[in-house]
Amino acid sequence: MDTMHHIAQTAINQTPPECRVQAEDAQVIARHSDCLLAMGPAVVKAFYDTLYGHDQTERLFRPGERPMRERTLASWWERTVRGPLDDDYWAWMALVGLTHVVRRVTNPMMLAMTGFVAQFVETNSDALPVPQTEQRHVVTALRRVCATAGAIITFAYDHAVSSALFEVAGMPQALLARLRDQEISQALALAHTQVQSSSHN
């Protein structure tokens, strides 16, 4: 398997520049790191209240695990707002993707929660002691951080699964990809037929 740094950079390169973190986003976050850091406990509580409030996500956790998981998220938030948002930071996000495979955290769950963090910041941006114009910049910056993190985590997740299947199957990865595409093409054709049939009923 590729290194976490390589996986992260590949995902970043595939993400349109307008949707990923820019240098000015990191500067905005750095300027307001103290007030964003103060928002951290609220982010962590709301995040895990949401996960523990849904049976599909709550069942992923072991009994008594929440405090440890909250500390991990708090560490992520602190690193995010204090920086740097460098190659090591994004490699960490790739590692999260592999962790999610083992913990059975699905990509829909992950994408929903990265969106949740971005939405939480936007919803509570009025509480930030900064001018309204700066509030908008902060919201945009954190939205791009979450989007970039989500892109890397999902890419790393899929890369890890396909690499593992390649190792288990013991066949060239290109051949495995062709077989996958053939199978999905057949499923896609069937799905089109089903959709067209239901739309005519």
Image: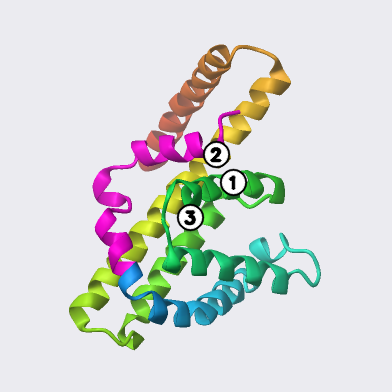
Which residues make up the magenta segment?
1-29
Q: Position of residue 141 (x, y in %)?
A: 31, 63
Q: Is residue 161 above or below residue 115?
A: above
Q: Residues within 10 Å of mark 1 (few under 14, many from 20)?
A: many
Query: Dot 1 lies on which element?
Result: helix
| Amino acid found under the numbered disc labelled 2 | Met
Q: Which mark is residue 77?
A: none
Which label lies toward us, 2 or 3? Answer: 2
The reply to whether residue 201 is visible in this rendering is no
Mark-to-mark CA distance, 1 and 2 = 6 Å
Query: Dot 3 lies on which element?
Result: helix
Q: Is residue 19 above or below residue 127?
A: above
The answer to whether residue 54 is magenta is no
Q: Position of residue 146 (x, y in %)?
A: 41, 58
Task: Identify the residue position indicated by label 1 in the image.
Answer: 95
Task: Identify the residue position indicated by label 2 in the image.
Answer: 4
Labels in figure, total: 3
Q: Which mark is residue 111?
A: 3
Q: Earlier in the sequence, mark 1 or mark 3?
A: 1
Residue positioned 51% across, 44% down in the render: 154
Residue positioned 36% across, 65% down in the render: 142
Q: Earlier in the sequence, mark 2 or mark 3?
A: 2
**Front residue (pair 47, 76):** 76
Quadrant of the snapshot with the N terminus: top right
**Front residue (pair 5, 95):** 5
Query: In the displayed structure, does residue 82 sit left or right of residue 164?
Result: left
The reply to whether residue 97 is visible in this rendering is yes
The majority secondary structure of the magenta stretch comes to helix
Query: In the displayed structure, does residue 138 sit left or right of residue 116?
Result: left
| Amino acid found under the numbered disc labelled 3 | Leu
Q: Position of residue 114 (x, y in %)?
A: 47, 60
Q: How is the image coloured?
A: rainbow
